[in-house]
Each structure stands twice: as structure tokens, then as C-alpha cells.
Amino acid sequence: MAILLENALVVTLERREPVLEGQQILVQDGVIAEIGNRVRTGRRIEKRIDCSGKIVMPGLVNGHSHLTEILQRSMRDNVRMESWRGYRARTEEMARLTPREIEAGAKLACAEMLKHGITAVVDHFSTRPGLSVAKMRAILAAFDKTGIRGVLAASLRDQDFLKVIASPRGRSSARKEESWREEVLEVLAHVRESSGTSAIMLGPSSPQNCSDALLREVAEMAERYDLGIHTHLLETRLQRWASSKIYGRSLPEHLKKLGFLSNRLSAAHCVWLDEKGMDLMAAAGASAVHNPASNLKLGSGVAPVIKMKKRGVNVALGTDGGDTSDTYSVFDQMRLAAFLSRLTAEESEEWLTALDALRMGTINGANAVPAWRGKTGRIKKGYRADLVILKPQLRFYPLNNIIHQLVFCEGGGSVDTVLVDGEIVVQGGCLTRVDERTIIKQVEPIGKKMNRFYNRIRSRPDPEQATVRKLYQRAFEDGRRSQSF
């Protein structure tokens, strides 16, 4: 299908000419075929879109998310990540979500993202009591039915770092979970046989929740099957402290020794990454995914984005999940990322600019995923046509600086039309592939079930709370001692 966007004010993301006026964009067979003041079509145009008075920008990229967490949206407050994780896991274990329920929750999250201009998402998919082909296919079905470009990064783990660090020797025996390899390969074969926009990554939960053997196997499997790797990395102070105790070296140094660091890797959070770790990531070509809202809500800290950027680390953005940042909006993350940089650098010249933040939410996100690298994230001839058309609302006026206002003023309410791979999946602010009211109707009873189980769980003593509190006390005490020398 050939689509022609006319009279477009185009956000290019280029440093020299970040905005171009009066442009035409020709989309053919899902690809940006031409862009310019007047393009040669060469074939019949099936659809023309008049973009007069509107803004055309690249689709936003959500580099780290947990889609089914939307079913536990905003249940918790005032808990550290480690305690929060336990509540979430126990709620899921009691709920025993079916593939149909998983698909419904994922569709709701995808629908919210599309209506807020997100055209591509990495879902770090974890579910209790465990992975299965049917559950992974449910996520892929949500991608396909809503039309979003999606990556399924199945979460893998074979140990619990809280138990590891709390044990006398700082080690615990790894659990054997042999079936994940065959299941992931089966889903990978299904994805590669289809003609959709979905892809697969390997998603070890976090390095300290995985044995060295599992991490080595993930790295080898990614190389063998040409896959990306996605993980959480040094999200909390406790994780950094515990990693040094477990490995006797920094976590990035340990990962390098295992052959885990490479340009296949994107690592969420990186809040407690030190400068040597940043250099190791930059040298390997690994990407960091900044999740500012989640890091703030869980009290994890402020990621050293400016330092990572200076050292050459590609930094993308993620929303995390429905109970950690609570909304699936990259517009929110761009604004927070820019504002938080004001707290971590003394010189204003070093702060993230609005253009920096916008690139983090688009092209940097695409570059963090091997399957998307060089194919999406910008408006350029030959790239896939993942485009967002905004009809500016009141908060955009007066329109003084488009780049600044996209980051500092926009929240997603101006999104009018969204194209993914050249297909219109949002038109006039409405989803075209799925019915929003039907999805909400499907999810409401599931959410009530989750809430019922959570209320039951929180009425009992938390078995991990005392352990988490003691470990944090030890981490803070060690930190104070090291500063006193």
C-alpha cells in the first residue's frame, strides 16, 4: 500500500536540521520510500494524509517494559524494589494467570502505548509460576492484534539473589529449569516463520538472579541464533553491594569475564553503574535503558545518564511496568530524564537537552535492539514507516520551539495518527485493529482478581521484608565505612 503524507512539519532528529517544514513523506510497503518538499510517487497513492497544522515525528520506542504488570497497576506505594518484587511475584503465583488473561493485559498495555505514540516495545516478560509456550504466544498475539512492533524478552532465572547474599557462604545452588531452551526456540521458530513485526530476545531477569552457567548459555545462544539480550542491571544500591559480595568484583567486570557484555545487550536501569562499568559497557557496545519514573517511585536512585552518555554508552528510555511508573508513556520518561539531569551535573551545558531526550526515546531505543537497529527510530529514506502524527492541543501553544515542547509540554494527548510498519493503527485518536472498550471489559475482572489476592497477601507478615531491611542496613553501613577511609 502506498500512503502519502503531505504538508508535514517533520521532526527529523538530525542535529543540523531537527525540524523541516512543508514536507511530503511517501510510504510504500511499510518503508519510507521518499521524503522531501515534493517527492516522486511512481505508483498510485491509495491514501493521502493531509498533515497541515500537525507534527510528524518518529514513533517512540519503549526499551524496557513489563506489559502484564498493568494487571497490578498502582497497587503498591512506599516499598523498595526488592520488597515490591516479592509482592508482585506472590500475587501472580496466587492468580495463576491463563494465556487468555495474559493476552488481555498485554493488549491493554499495547493499546495505551500506541495511543501515546509508542510504536515499538521490549516486553521483559515474566510470569509466575513459570514460562510456557502458550504464555509467550499470548504476548505475541497481543503484539499482532494491536499492531505494535514488539520484542518478547522471556525472563530467565535459576536462583534468588536475596537467598544467595543472605546465605553464610554467599552462594546457593542453582535451580534446574531445563525446559526454557526448547520453549524459547519453539517460539523463535514461530516468529521467524511469520511475516509480522515481532521479534525475540533472551531476557535473563538480572545477572545476580542467574547462575554463571545460565549467563554463559544465554550469551552463547544469542550468538548462535543472532538474538539480542535484555536484562536488569544494578537497579538498586543493594544489588551493587550484593554483587561485590557474591563475585568479589564489580558486576560489569564479572559479566565481561563471562563473555556476557556485547552489542547484543540492553540493560535496564543501570542506576548504580560506576565509571569503570560504564567504560566496559561502552567498549562492548552495550546499551543502557533509563527508567526514570520507576527508579523514582521505588526509591532506587537517579541513573548517571550524563556520565554514561559522555563515555559513549547508548542510552535509551523505558517505562517499566504498570506498578512501578504506573503509565506506559515515553513522553513522561523523556521529560523526567531531561529534568533529572539537572540534579546530577553542576554545569548547565552538560544537562540533557530536549533533543537529547527525544533521541533517547526514539533512535537510541531502536539502536538498543539488534532487530530494530538501523531499521526504525527515525524518519529517513529506507527506514520502516513507524510514524506518529500529532495534532497539537492547548498545552502546545504558542508553538515556539517544537523539540522543546514535545519533551516539556506533551504527554501523549496530542497523538492523532500512528503508523507501524506503514499500517495505520491509530486514526483520529482511536485504535483501528482492536476495540478499546472490549479490552477494558476483558481486563476489569482480571484486575479485581489480582487486587483480591494482593489484599490477602498484604494482610499477612511479609516473609522477605525483614531480610531486605537487614541487607540494606548492611549495605548502608559498609558504604559509610568505605567513605570514612
Image (tube, rainbow, N blue to C red):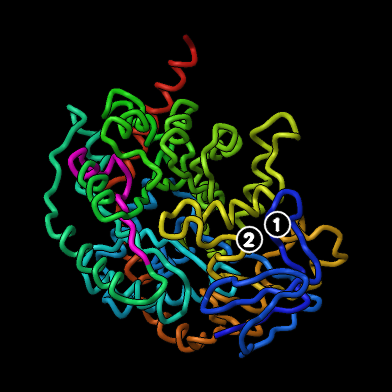
Q: Residue at (42%, 31%) from the top-left corner?
A: 280
What's drawn in magenta, residue-wise?
A: 199-215
Q: Amino acid at mark 1?
A: Val
* Residue 452: x %, y % from top left: 35, 72
Left or right: residue 181 compared with residue 268:
left
Against 379, is 38 above or below? below
Report whether residue 129 is seen.
no
CA gap between label 1 and label 2 equals 6 Å
Q: Position of residue 435 (x, y in %)?
A: 50, 88
Does 205 appear in magenta? yes
Q: Is residue 29 above or below residue 216?
A: below
Quadrant position of residue 479: top left
Q: Earlier in the sequence, mark 1 or mark 2?
A: 2
Mark seen at residue 263: none
Q: Residue at x 20, y 68 (%)?
A: 186
Query: Of the residues shown, which amino acid type is indicated by label 2?
Result: Phe
Which residue is disc 1 drawn over? 407
Q: Check disc 2 and report the residue beneath it.
A: 331
212 to 124, vertically: above or below? above
| SS of the residue under disc 1 | helix
Q: Residue at x 48, y 32 (%)?
A: 278
Q: Are dots 1 and 2 in contact, CB under 8 Å?
A: yes
